[in-house]
Image: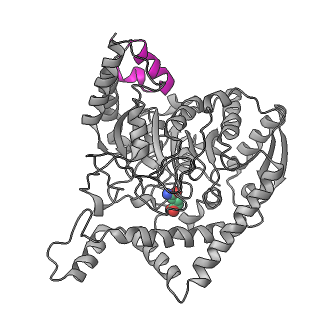
Amino acid sequence: MVIQAKDIKYLNATELAKLVANKEISAKELVDVTYKNIDLIEPKIDALNSLTKELAYSIAETVDSKIKNNEKLPPLAGVPVAIKDNMCIKNCLATCSSKILEDFYAPYTSTVAQKVIDNLLIPVAKTNLDEFAMGSSTENSGFKTTKNPWDLNKVPGGSSGGSAASVASGQVSLSLGSDTGGSIRLPASFCGVAGMKPTYGLVSRYGLIAYASSLDQIGPFARNITDLSLLLQVIAGYDHKDSTSINKPVPDYSEALKVDIKNFKIGILSDLIAEGVQPEVKSAIESVLKLFKENGAQIDEVTLPHQKYAIATYYIIAPAECSANLARYDGVKYGIRNEDSPDLMDMYLNTRKKGFGDEVKRRIMLGTYALSSGYYDAYYKKAQQVRALIKQDFDNLFEKYDLLVSPACPNTAFDIGSRVDDPLTMYLTDIATVTANLAGIPGISIPCGFDSNGLPIGLQILAPVLQESKMLQAAYTFEQLTDYNRHFDKIKL
Ligand code: GLN
């Protein structure tokens, strides 16, 4: 059967896997048409930094030979996936969208990528991001700004903007991102796809190029919850190579989707639908609550008493950790080097000056300042104390509630260029998402409406530590009751 690029564009991962398993298309053909799609769409959205063709075709060959031999395949075998360019795959570029790593080929494979490969999914490309995952719009990429597929003048959200845009635009059905303060949930919200940040420690960070290690977590993007759960299943689980990895059995997430949400107690974080929130976002969330109520859930308004300190706390801790993590880029071990320096110090300084963009430099300065001996207690220590209070706020709420909900962002996607010169406004974009990272809990964004310009609105659902199943159940129920993830035909690329 001859399958055209446009035929597979919006098939979901489960459907693609079935086509391959039923021999309606070979894995090689699927990779061929995926690259055709990418060629057509990519010039319009700039979501990808590089293609991983050699790897893709070698896995496709493995899948095809297993099929030929009638071997049993894992559930997503043969499905193309895009991977954020801050995760290492041996012999592939891993640039973090930074000039300092422009020519860096990873010497080893991250645990997540290895699991993806072991499960016979096919990494086809590395996706664009804000440099070192620092940003909320993908405009801080050292290479290019990814466009929002729904409106090419809008940002796709960040920092995993490339991963979200590649799924929304139909380049791939699945991708991986990382979320330090919202970098999966925010672009998922702006691009109208599902994206989740798992519990801190559920997915190994080994081979994820570090931004802020106590907050970073890898997670999946998909166009529906079934696919998302299957990809989470692939990447979750204990890894001795990551000292913060949780050593507990991983539940069957797909099984969990079958349970209904009747009797769930859900808290709506009322501060996040108060003043300053785009009215269409507010009313979309209100409709969600109504729907949950009609389906048997109990809904109460709740607050996180320390929510108002969340952005300040996050923007001390994340830069502090980044300033330490990024000290390794000195021109000696990784990436570019300033070659014409007369001495070592000049080489360090000029390598970093040339290699890092403005936002990364800003964060390194903020973080170094917050960690300096004179200010450590006033900033870093204080921020850690407030972080503990925010975690306690969640612990208290989760004694009474199964799940908490809010918008993923107070607004829909904004114009490219409109916030990039105003770091504080840009930081406020993360108001709803950073608390989950500070507390280490899981969170998801799923599409729950459109604004008057047709831009997607994201619903955030938060759950207690390791309660991903509950969160996915609620998301799945919502998806069954609505059709917000079935409007991709409106994207004209
Ligand atoms: N926007 C936040 C930041 O710039 C979050 C980024 C992320 O989650 N990687 O730090």
Is 4 one of the magenta-colored residues? yes
- Residue 124: percent from the left, percent from the top? 34, 36
- Left of 397 or right of it: where is 217? left
Foreground residue, 491 or 189?
A: 189
The part of the image, by quadrant, that contains residue 432 is: bottom right
- Seen at 27% across and 30% down, the residue is 58
Is residue 398 visible in the rendered image? The answer is yes
Q: Residue furthest bottom?
A: 374
- Residue 226: percent from the left, percent from the top? 58, 29
Is residue 156 visible in the rendered image? The answer is no
Residue 40 vs 384, above or below: the answer is above
Name the image colouring: one colour
- Seen at 53% across and 52% down, the residue is 245
Q: Which residues are magenta?
A: 2-24
Q: Quadrant of the C terminus?
A: top left
Q: Residue furthest top?
A: 1
- Left of 71 or right of it: where is 294? right
- Seen at 32% across and 55% down, the residue is 95
